[in-house]
Amino acid sequence: MAQASKLIAASHNFSRIHATSSLNPQPRPSISLPQSSIKPTKSITSNLFPFHPIKAYNNNIPTNFNNTSIKNKTILPNFSASAKPIEKVDEEEESEPNTWIEAVFPEKLRPYAYLVRLDKPIGTWLFGWPCMWSLALTANPGSLPDAKMLAFFFFVSFLSRNIACTINDYFDKDFDAMVARTKRRPIASGAITGFQALLFLGIQVLATYGLLFPVNELSRLLWVSSLPLIFTYPLMKRITYWPQAHLGLTANWGALYSWAAVKGSLDPAIVFPLLAAAFFWTLEVDTIYAHQDKEDDVKAGVKSTALLFGDSTKLWTSAFGLAAVGLYLLAGFNSNIGWPFYLLMIAASGQIAWQIWAVDLSDPADCARKFLSNKWFGGIVFSAILLGRLVS
């Protein structure tokens, strides 16, 4: 028995001296190593991600070793319940996600793909839906719109949105560098120079204008008239709290030039209510979107309706939503559309009401989710017009 007690005591002493994890909080013995034998660690991630740095996952790992850091910090990973998993770093510490762009594009072209947000197609949908709505309204009663025209103007919308992203990031490169969500964009991070961005912009404008030559002159001129709106949109946040209103015209101008491509002229009773409806829809959508960056926008000194409305945002966006739905109904009524349009617009109204009242404006991730849901709102409105035309 005496010998067993001695063994147990020795075991307890051994565990006190050789604790190796947060499961046993006893202090470790200090270790002194020669200064010359310790070399600073060198990150390899800067070579792998030239414009999206990744930070170390464990702040307990010293980047410059010395005797003091060895004595006061463990160089083993912390496996306690409060430790941060390797794959779940903070948002501000994350690099750009590894998207399909990395697999498809050569390394030199990837920054340009990220510049025009190829990995984030929601902007193309927001530029494209007004064109699709307008083209659907041009269809004859009992008929569907021309599928080739739908595909053509969706591609024009894609190119127009790419132009908008390029000029936006060129003007906003200094602001983007101060905002957590945008600081890794290619121009802000230095992956693309300002001259390269402008050269790329010129190529896009010329290519899109050339693509429009098969359509009539009015449609081409209306597309060209959208360029001043696109080029000046990034400047609006510097001078007004209503940049979202400017975007409401910029993103929805396609309702005019797509209609003109089919009809050769504009029907004000249909096209202008449709444009106004899309305008108020964009005000609602982009105000929610702007709540993602409101704290960074204050620091950067830029303006938005999110900052203007503050706690009254849901009341304002509700008013915008009501105006949008009313104007969609007016455009449909003036075009003598069939009853399925009105039935499906009830569903569209429900979707827009849900996103306004369900959104948590203090949660950037939830604001982003509600913003992304608008591709479905656009799809419901498009379906309403298609079915309404078929039975009109």
Image: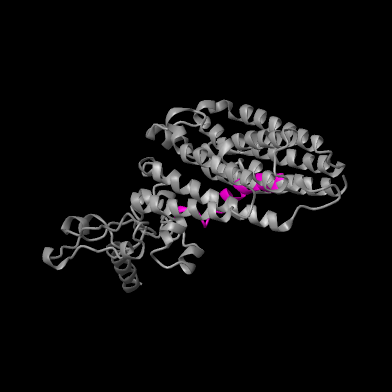
Let me know if residue 266 is in the magenta part: no
**Which quarter of the rendering shows the N terminus?**
bottom left
Residue 270 in the image, given as x and y percentages of width and height: 74, 36
**Residue in view at x 37 percent, y 59 percent:** 78
Q: Is 149 left or right of 40, judged from the image as shown? A: right
Residue 289 in the image, given as x and y percentages of width and height: 55, 40
Let me know if residue 127 is in the magenta part: yes
In this orientation, which residue lies closer to the viewer: 173 or 39? 173
Residue 152 in the image, given as x and y percentages of width and height: 64, 56
**Residue in view at x 37 percent, y 50 percent:** 187
**Residue in view at x 51 percent, y 51 percent:** 162
Q: Is residue 288 visible?
A: no
- Give the magenta range: 115-134
The picture quadrant where one finds residue 74 is bottom left
In this orientation, which residue lies closer to the viewer: 14 or 308? 308
**Which quarter of the rendering shows the C terminus?**
top right
In this orientation, which residue lies closer to the viewer: 380 or 155? 155
